[in-house]
Image (tube, grey):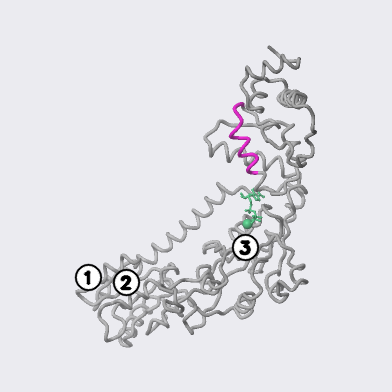
Amino acid sequence: MSNATILIADDDEDIRLALNLLLSAEGYQIIEAENAKEITIQSSRQKPDLVLLDMNFSRDTTSGQEGLAILEQLQPLNIPVILMTAWGSIDLAVQGLQKGASDFIEKPWNKLKLLTSIKQQLSFSKVKEQNQGYRQLLASEQSKAWICQSPSMQAIESLVAQIAPTDANILILGENGTGKSLLAERIHQLSARNQAPLIAVNMAAIPDNLFESELFGHQKGAFTDAKQNRVGRFQLADQGTLFFDEIGSLPLTLQPKLLRVLETGQYEVLGSSQTQVADARLISATNADLNQLVTEQAFRQDLLYRLNTIVITIPPLRERLEDIEALALSFIDKFTAKYHKPALTISLCAISKLKQHNWPGNIREFSHVIERAVLLTTATEITAQQLLLENTDNSNDAVLLQPLEEAEKQLIEKAMKVTNGQVMEAAKLLDISRNALYRRLEKFAIQHEK
Ligand SMILES: Nc1ncnc2c1ncn2[C@@H]1O[C@H](COP(=O)(O)OP(=O)(O)OP(=O)(O)O)[C@@H](O)[C@H]1O
Ligand SMILES: [Mg+2]
């Protein structure tokens, strides 16, 4: 890979110059850094393809500790690092390799060795990147079916195809379990950023006092509990996507802190005065009514305007009945595979029952119902009864107060009806033995096959 950019990190100007001449002549683009601060800025801004890192950084230190610390900071960026160590400091080189360096060379360097190592590391990292993309694609295709048969979901599909490749900020709205998180993942996969990570942040789950440290990171010692450096979510999502889940739960006091980075594209790691540039595409999601929150002055309007360039509202499941059958089949496949069950079908009656249910928990609830039915079914077809959806739409008021015997008779009649008179199945539904059911069928003179 000629044209690759290499960061030369050495405090000795003569060495930088010598390396610069050697590597430029080979067609590489060169950037230089002479201290730890510059290395961090240059590597996060210019995103070099490889770093050549001197291990004995400050002239008066020879322990290499500073080099190791820099190496650690570079790790999240996933850039191959070749260490340059003084001749004879093999221990240090080994420590460096254990901390994630790709290779090391000894100073004074052998030109051929140096050039070969650079070439190798650049091609390894390319293969690694391709594999990662491929694995992500495989994982997403195998486990994350995305059902969108209904007209409303089809409309969302074409909008997504249009906007996913852009960097537009997206706000996803929808009730619990409608697929907001899954859609965010899909948009990331369909975007040009899919080689970099999608980093999710649940805004409801971050304690107020850790908010800035979570988002922007901190340096060791920035506050009492900051025992180690911490990489913030903005940096982890560099060149990728940041997913702010439950954005409606972000406390009003913290909203200006988020607003600032969205407005300026810049932030500071806590404990550092160095300004970082944010390069992440933003997707947010909530089941709250943000406009209502704005009216109640619980959510800042200016922040909302930063987030909602494109709004996608996923309709509740009860309003997209055309998706139900496909969802059922897809979840049946998923759960029969998960529980190593033989292939299963689902009865028409069961499908129609699924369509009548109200689904307050939307697809998440739907998936649990199918999972349970797959577990309960011993035959080859899931029937309406196995969905166990009775009484979910009404409360217990539907149960009439009546003599116990009468209630028992009605329950048995019902079980026989929904199982089409299959005593075995009816007994299972009532959780009694087959013989116990036979005795009651005789007692109440309910028709049945002997
Ligand atoms: N269109 C779809 N096709 C197939 N499965 C889906 C679809 N939408 C959602 N799911 C599945 O339904 C479940 C719930 O989806 P998800 O977690 O994305 O919902 P959510 O809206 O983010 O929920 P919450 O409001 O709780 O955050 C997941 O298992 C997801 O894989
Ligand atoms: Mg979610």
Q: On the rendered image, what quadrant is the N terminus found in?
A: bottom left
* Residue 54, position as x, y percentages in the image: 31, 78
Alpha-carbon span between mark 2 and mark 3: 46 Å
Residue drawn at x 75%, y 71% is 294
Alpha-carbon span between mark 1 and mark 3: 47 Å
Label 1 sits on residue: 90
* Residue 244, position as x, y percentages in the image: 61, 65
* Residue 389, position as x, y percentages in the image: 71, 37
* Main secondary structure found in the magenta portion: helix
Sequence-wise, which precedes: disc 1 or disc 2?
Answer: 1
- As rendered, which of 2 and 244 lies closer to the eye? 244
For label 1, the crowd category at 10 Å Cα-Cα, with few meaning under 14, some 14 to 19 and many 20 or more, is: some
**The residue tagged with tag 3: helix, strand or loop?**
strand
34 sits left or right of 321 in the view: left
What segment carries the magenta color?
Answer: 367-379
Label 2 sits on residue: 115
In the image, residue 157 sits, relative to residue 39, either above or below, namely above
436 sits left or right of 136 in the view: right
Amino acid type assigned to the residue bearing label 3 in the image: Asp
